[in-house]
Image (spheres, rainbow, N blue to C red):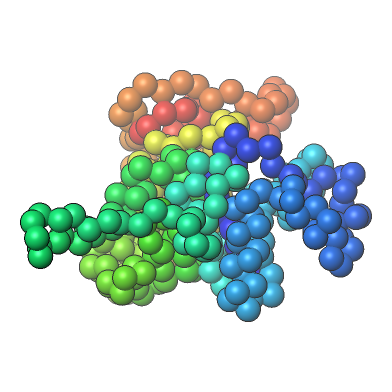
Amino acid sequence: YLALSYVWGGANTFHLTKSNFEVLRQPGSLMEYFPHIPQVVRDAMRFTDQLNVQYLWCDSLCIIQDDPIHRDPQITHMNTVYRHAFATVVAMSGQSADDRLPGLSLGSRSSLQPIRLHRGVDLEPLPPSLELAMLSSQYESRAWTYQERILSARCLYFTHSQLYFQCRSSLRSENGESIHYVKRHLVNPLLEFETRPHTALDYFWLDFFRCYDLVVRTYTQRHLSHQYDKLRAFSGISTMFEESRAGAFQYGLPEAVLDLVLLWIPCGQITRVSSKKYDPSSCRDYIPSWSWAGWDGPV
């Protein structure tokens, strides 16, 4: 299956609910609602079909949005969905779910026009780099999409100028260019950690901390619609680290190097994250102040 990663934005998104759950389980039922499905989801369905892949996973249609008993466990385990998808379709240039996947159909993206210096001499402009496309995108400002992207085995980045493909060993652009090896890790810092050569245990912790530090720096600069989701939107990353011999995590901090990671400091204005529901007799949904996850802002 393919997975879709995108921003909802201000779109009035058609989604799976308790009221339409049984109807949408019937074969062919999506066609009845097709005009109401967000444009980016429709494009992703079409793209999945063109690649001859049988299934597409999309959060708005695969999670019952108004049923906390179904929704909350699914959200907690969304990292599993993206880690095991054959590839993730990343709507990098979209501002909302109503935007198209650029390049999927004619006229859905702008073309780069040559610049004429004088007669017989034209300059062919190069499309922006993937890093530049990321810096200017709404997608890269959101916390949930960060986890979805860096945990994916393969990503197909749809940008305004061209398509990029990334796997665990390569990053290529639509014009055939192979991106330099070092630049891959600027796009996905987990790659350097996962593909590093096996070393002595002391070097493992050095490599781990460098990667963890970069991931947390990047993650805490991003935004969440609900701040009480801060650890849930990071849970897939911490699970990946745990499975890579880093050990257990407590409130976003690895136990094995707890003395070191407790030394986080704010690098801008931060505010205390309020709990979704605070029960003095229970620590559920409560994030302590000694964790960076208990604060909203960059660290």
Q: Is residue 125 above or below residue 292?
A: below
Q: Is residue 18 left or right of residue 206?
A: right
Residue 6 vs residue 174, the one in the foreground? 174
Residue 188 vs residue 9, the one in the foreground? 9
Residue 286 appears in which quarter of the rendering?
top right
Q: Residue at x 55, y 47 (%)?
A: 99
Residue 31 appears in which quarter of the rendering?
bottom right
Q: Is residue 229 left or right of residue 164?
A: right
**View extreme (bottom): residue:** 52
Q: Is residue 35 above or below residue 163?
A: above
Q: List x then y, in percent, for residue 4.
A: 59, 58
Q: List x then y, in percent, for residue 75.
A: 67, 48
Q: Residue at x 50, y 41 (%)?
A: 95
**View extreme (front): residue:** 119
Q: Residue at x 65, y 63 (%)?
A: 45
Residue 208 visible (yes or no):
no
Q: List x then y, in percent, for residue 153.
A: 49, 68
Residue 86 vs residue 138, the one in the foreground? 138
The image quadrant where one finds the N terminus is bottom right
Q: Residue at x 47, y 45 (%)?
A: 139
Residue 254 vs residue 231, the one in the foreground? 231
Tag count = 0
The image quadrant where one finds the C terminus is top left
Q: List x then y, in percent, for residue 167.
A: 42, 71
Q: Is residue 235 left or right of residue 55?
A: left
Q: Is residue 213 left or right of residue 145?
A: left
Residue 19 visible (yes or no):
yes
